[in-house]
Amino acid sequence: MIGIAYNEFDYLHNIDSHVENSLRTESIISEIISYKKEIEDRINFFIVKDLNYQNETWSLVYKVHTQEYVDFVKQKVNKIKKFEFLDPDTYITPHTLKIILSNLEILFSLCDWIVSTGNYGFAYIRPPGHHAESKKAMGFCIINNVAVLARYLQTYHNIKKVMIVDFDAHHGNGTQEIFYSDDTVLYFSTHAYPFYPFTGSNSEKGSGKGIGYTYNFPVSIYAGDKELLEIYQKDFVEIYDRFEPEFLIISSGYDIHSHDPITYMNCSLDGINKIKSIILQKAKYKNLVFVLEGGYNINVLKEVVKYDINRIQ
């Protein structure tokens, strides 16, 4: 059995003309619903039905982002009527923070279930988060979802070692920055380089007690299945075995696909599924969650979720 989480209200964080728009998850949700009757006995669903959230969730956000930054975003959200940009790429609406907080809560619930049952799951949530640093928004990202989740698992489930694997075409500079001096969260990233956000060279290995807990594997901006699969078959497996994580979080960026409109990488759907299979098999299909980051081709996203669902049939 697997868990699947999504938010029925994330259309409230949306600009139709922006590449990071609500059609991304609407296409995924419609695909899930088309299969729902066939698979509902094998999937545990975690779905946002309203935008209420607990104030306690903010305390976890503050473990990742500074009070000054979060207060700045809160003030912006409270003042705007339609939308505003925090940087040239990253927009907010009056509902953005409610979307993000409710996303985090279903992510927590999904992972509570994963920890208690030893299963795994997929969180098809947006906006993405891996570019959001402790003090600033970047690259469509406002709050770093996977970073907050890592702190949640450590705080509420006493998990000592979390591994974050990021296969987005863009380096997760925010996730790296947040855990750069931390030896309890290992960050492993494959990404196009040099490419936005122009971080993630293989010389970036952490600082202080975090030295040796950041692993970057930059590849050509035109790289495809062969280059990435070699890294996951060898380096990922070796680093996983050495670190022995208790929980695995995967920042899943489907913009590595050859048909993505804003990147140049050349992975196939089969290659992406093989990467995911390597990760799943190494973790023995338990105590891991795939969290949506990039991926801006709607048809590719539909095919990805179709494969995720068919995996359990």
Image (spheres, rainbow, N blue to C red):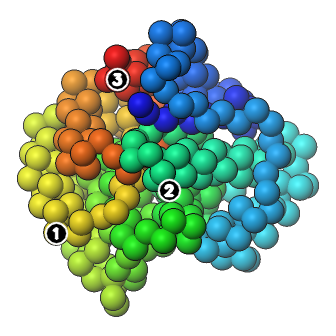
Q: Name the residue under label 2.
A: 146
Calculate the distance from the C-alpha at mark 3 to the C-alpha at mark 1: 29 Å
How many neighbours does mark 1 have within 10 angstroms: few (below 14), some (14-19), or many (20 or more)?
few
- Residue drawn at 53 percent across, 31 percent down: 44
Q: Is mark 2 on a helix, strand or loop?
A: helix
Mark 3 vs 1, N-terminal side: 1
Left/right placement of residue 60 relative to residue 183 reads right
Location of the C terminus by quadrant is top left
Mark 2 vs 3, N-terminal side: 2
Q: Cβ–Cβ below 8 Å for labels 3 and 1?
A: no
Left/right placement of residue 217 relative to residue 262 reads left
Q: What residue type is labelled 2?
A: Val
- Compared with 214, 223 (above or below) is above
Image x and y of residue 51, in percent: 80, 41
- Residue drawn at 14 percent across, 55 percent down: 237
- Compared with 167, 239 (above or below) is below
Calculate the distance from the C-alpha at mark 2 to the C-alpha at mark 3: 24 Å
Is residue 292 shown to the viewer in this render? no
Q: Mark 3 points at which residue?
A: 312
How many neighbours does mark 3 have within 10 angstroms: few (below 14), some (14-19), or many (20 or more)?
few
Image x and y of residue 273, in percent: 26, 30
Location of the N terminus by quadrant is top left
